[in-house]
Structure formats: C-alpha cells, structure tokens
C-alpha cells in the first residue's frame, strides 16, 4: 500500500511545519531520529511528554505531537522533574540546547543527574547560542569565534558526556546528526532506561556557528563529522573532549544500573512511614 | 544493480527496491539526502520550489534500495521512501 504521506506525520504537529530552523541546521535531523525512536518502541504518544527550554532547540517541544511544554530559559529539567513526580507512569524527555541546559540551566542538570532522576535528556549541542545571535556558549570549543569572542574563545568548554557521567547519569551517549541509526538506537535505549539518561547530539548550526567560523554550510559540517568522528563505545568520557574542528569521539560511554530517584524515594518513604505510605502513581512509577 | 563480484546466490537474493517521494514545498535544499544516500540515487533538481530551493529528485528509477536514510536525515521531513515491489536481481 502506498500512502502519499510522510510516515512521521502522526508524530508531528504538521500545522506548524515548515519549522523555523535554518537550511542545513541539524536540529530537524535530531527530531526525526527521536520520532523514529518513538515509533520503533511503539510507545503510546499519550505516555510521552517533551519539555524544552529556550533557544533554537527549545522549539522542538512545539513541533512534536505529544504533550509538550516550552518552559522558561534553563528550567526544562526542574519542570520535567515535577512532571515526572506527578505523572510517574509517563516517559518525560527533556529536549533542549547546550546553552539552555548547561549555562542557564547548568545547576539543574548536575542535580538531576546526581539524583538519578528518571528523565531522558537530549541535548543538541551546536557549540553556540543560535537564536539569540551567536554568543559564546559553555560548549564553544577553544579558539572558535562567536559574536562575543570575535578574536577566538579562550575559555575551556564543558565536555558534556564527562559532566553527565561524573554527576551520576546512568546512561550517557554522544552522536552527531550524521549518525542517524546509532542516535535513534541510543534514543530508544535511553527511553527505556530507568534513571537519568543523557544523549548529546552534535549538530550543525549553519547560520551562526558555521558562518562565524567560516566553516561553510551545515552540509560541510556533516561532511566534517563523516571524516572526523571516531566511534568508541565504552570509552572513558573524560577523554572525549572536543576541540575546534578536532576529531570527535562518539559512542555510548555509560550504561549502568543504579536505583533511580523514584526507587529511592519509595524506599525512603516506606522506611519512614511504613504501611501508611502509598506510592503516588503506583510502585512501577519509574520508567 | 551492479556488483563488483556477482554473489554466488545472486539468483536467489532479492534486493529491496524503494521509491522516494519528495514533498517539494517543504524542502530547504540542504543536500543532506543527496550527499549521504548510499546509492547516490538522488540529485538536486533544477526546478525551484516556492521558497526558492532546489528539491531533490531521483537520478535513476532502480537505484533506491529503500534504506530509509534520506527519510531519517532530512531535517525538514520532506522526503520519504516506500518499498516498491521487490525486483529480481540479474546476475
Ligand atoms: S541559528 Fe543555528 S541552531 Fe538556530 S536554527 Fe539556525 S542553524 Fe539552527
Ligand atoms: S531510501 Fe536510501 S537508497 Fe533510497 S534514495 Fe533514500 S537514501 Fe537513497
Ligand atoms: S534532506 Fe530534505 S531538506 Fe535537505 S535537500 Fe533533501 S529533501 Fe530537501
């Protein structure tokens, strides 16, 4: 049977497509992989919610046809935490950018990872603040140019997988917008993982990052990923630093078991309250 | 389909064959699908869409193997492929 309709139509708010992202921006590809992961797992769409912060990637929540929330800058994780505790049977996904999650919302990220909060966090990292005009982000590689580092960045950037792993995340992976199959598989695994899972998606920002740094278009960056990524599953994330146009180590770095926040909450409250404790949303609250 | 060495079971193996569909008005001409199609089955066409981009088109009729890469990599949800009837491989 041939349907003349894009297979992702049921997962997207088609009335809002075409989206605002620039030509050769990689965010749309990350969304497409996420939609594929949802489809692969046959997760009922009413059991998923997406929370985004502000920024180009912050628009993702608005394009997916699931319950979605566009929160204030940096606050996607605390919002998602509240949502998970109130609706423990749902899969809560935070989909946001590097600036939103690691600068404005940096503290929320480290504490959610420390608690092993039952969330999946997908960070599209394009090394810069796109929407606000190309300012330096905490992920901008050394010597890269941005509007606020016109002579080249001299601050050390975050290594996101290392940060996530050292704060306690139980699932950590990094792929680029080019690694569509591996990224989709990681997203599936993360959706089914208990506790705090984190996926970094390196993606081209053509309009500000590529242009400021004279790297061509997003397509040129995709070709760069093709030639310069090294897949190292299980690598120590500490060694996965990213330099300016340097080799990028990608892979699944961490996949371990550890009681999640909700597990621990049940144990702790049961210990304190005994039979009086009735778990909110049932015992299987965590995903 | 061309092989550099004809597989021994070429007469038994069926290669999937796909047909790609482009939603032309949605395409922003990024070229991801054209560049990364493993069969090099696509190229940017000469025509313009309403936004002024060149949407892709199929080069040959039989090249597409329905791998789904173009559908996944397209940031605009503008291209997808569906399985056509399976074609018999000629050795
Ligand atoms: S500014 Fe950069 S990140 Fe934002 S939509 Fe354009 S290319 Fe993408
Ligand atoms: S489905 Fe695969 S082979 Fe066919 S056009 Fe798309 S990328 Fe090329
Ligand atoms: S990947 Fe999508 S937007 Fe880019 S050229 Fe192909 S069809 Fe057009």
Image (cartoon, rainbow, N blue to C red):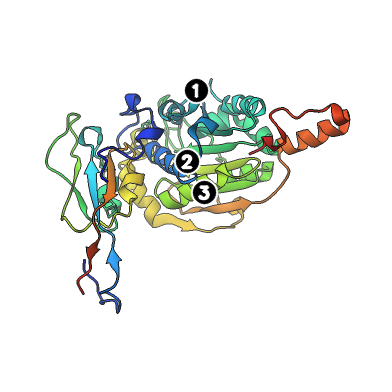
Q: Nearer the viewer, residue A138 or A88?
A: A88
- Residue A70's tag is 1
The answer to whether the residue labelled 1 contacts the one labelled 3, judged by CB atoms less than 8 Å apart, is: no
> Any atom of ligand 3 within 8 Å of the CB at mark 2?
no
Disc 1, SS: strand
Instruction: Say which label, 3 or 2, has the lower sequence index.
Output: 2
In the picture as drawn, the residue positioned furthest to the front comes out as A1
Q: The C terminus of chain A appears in which quarter of the rendering?
A: top right
In the picture as drawn, the residue positioned furthest to the top comes out as A72
Q: Which residue is mark 3?
A: A186
Q: How far from the left and from the top, in percent, is residue A125?
A: 48, 39
Q: Which residue is mark 2?
A: A38
Give the side of residue A246 with respect to residue A171, left or right. left
Q: Within 10 angstroms of label 2, few (less than 14), some, or many (20 or more) residues?
A: some
Q: Are marks 1 and 3 on the same chain?
A: yes
Q: Nearer the viewer, residue A143 or A72?
A: A72
Displayed quadrant of residue B45: top left
Q: How far from the left and from the top, in percent, is residue A129?
A: 45, 30
| Residue at 53% over, 21% down | A71
Q: How far from the left and from the top, in percent, is residue A266?
A: 77, 34
* Chain identity of mark 3: A
Disc 2, SS: helix
Q: Within 10 angstroms of label 1, few (less than 14), some, or many (20 or more) residues?
A: many
Using the numbered discs, state the Cα–Cα distance from disc 1 to disc 2 in whole angstroms. Answer: 20 Å
Q: Nearer the viewer, residue A215 or A29?
A: A29
Q: Nearer the viewer, residue A49 or A165?
A: A49
| Residue at 32% over, 28% down | A17
Give the side of residue A9 with respect to residue A149, left or right. left
Which quarter of the rendered image does ligand 1 occupy? top left
Q: Are marks 1 and 2 on the same chain?
A: yes
Q: Is residue A252 above or below residue A86?
A: below
| Residue at 69% over, 39% down | A116
């Amino acid at each position: 049977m041939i349907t003349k309709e894009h297979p992702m139509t049921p997962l997207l708010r088609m009335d809002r497509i075409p989206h605002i992202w620039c030509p050769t921006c990689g965010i749309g590809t990350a969304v497409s992989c996420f939609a594929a992961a949802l489809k692969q797992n046959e997760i009922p769409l009413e059991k998923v919610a997406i929370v985004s912060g502000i920024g180009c990637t912050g628009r993702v929540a608005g394009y997916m046809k699931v319950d979605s929330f566009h929160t204030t800058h940096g606050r996607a994780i605390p919002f998602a935490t509240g949502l998970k505790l109130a609706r423990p049977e749902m899969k809560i996904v935070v989909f946001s950018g590097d600036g939103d999650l690691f600068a404005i919302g940096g503290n929320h990220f480290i504490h959610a990872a420390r608690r092993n909060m039952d969330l999946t966090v997908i960070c599209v990292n394009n090394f810069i603040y796109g929407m606000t005009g190309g300012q330096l982000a905490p992920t901008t590689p050394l010597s890269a140019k941005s509007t606020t580092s016109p002579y080249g960045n001299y601050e050390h950037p975050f290594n996101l997988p290392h940060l996530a792993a050292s704060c306690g995340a139980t699932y950590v992976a990094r792929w680029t917008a080019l690694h569509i199959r591996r990224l989709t598989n990681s997203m599936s695994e993360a959706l089914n993982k208990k506790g705090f899972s984190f996926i970094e998606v390196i993606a081209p920002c053509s309009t500000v990052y590529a242009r400021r740094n004279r790297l061509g278009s997003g397509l040129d960056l995709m070709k760069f990923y093709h030639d310069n990524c090294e897949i190292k599953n299980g690598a120590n994330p500490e060694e996965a630093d990213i330099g300016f146009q340097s080799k990028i180590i990608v892979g699944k770095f961490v996949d371990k078991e550890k009681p999640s926040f909700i597990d621990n909450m049940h144990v702790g409250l049961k210990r304190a309250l005994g039979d009086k404790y009735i778990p909110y949303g049932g015992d299987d609250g965590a995903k | 389909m061309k092989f550099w060495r004809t597989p021994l079971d070429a007469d038994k193996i069926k290669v999937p064959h796909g047909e790609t569909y482009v939603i032309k008005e949605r395409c922003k001409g990024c070229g991801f699908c054209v560049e990364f199609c493993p069969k090099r089955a696509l190229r940017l066409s000469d025509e313009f869409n309403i936004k002024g981009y060149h949407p892709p088109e199929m080069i040959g009729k039989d090249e597409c193997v329905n791998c789904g890469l173009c559908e996944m990599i397209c940031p605009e949800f503008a291209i997808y492929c569906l399985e056509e009837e399976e074609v018999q491989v000629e050795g």
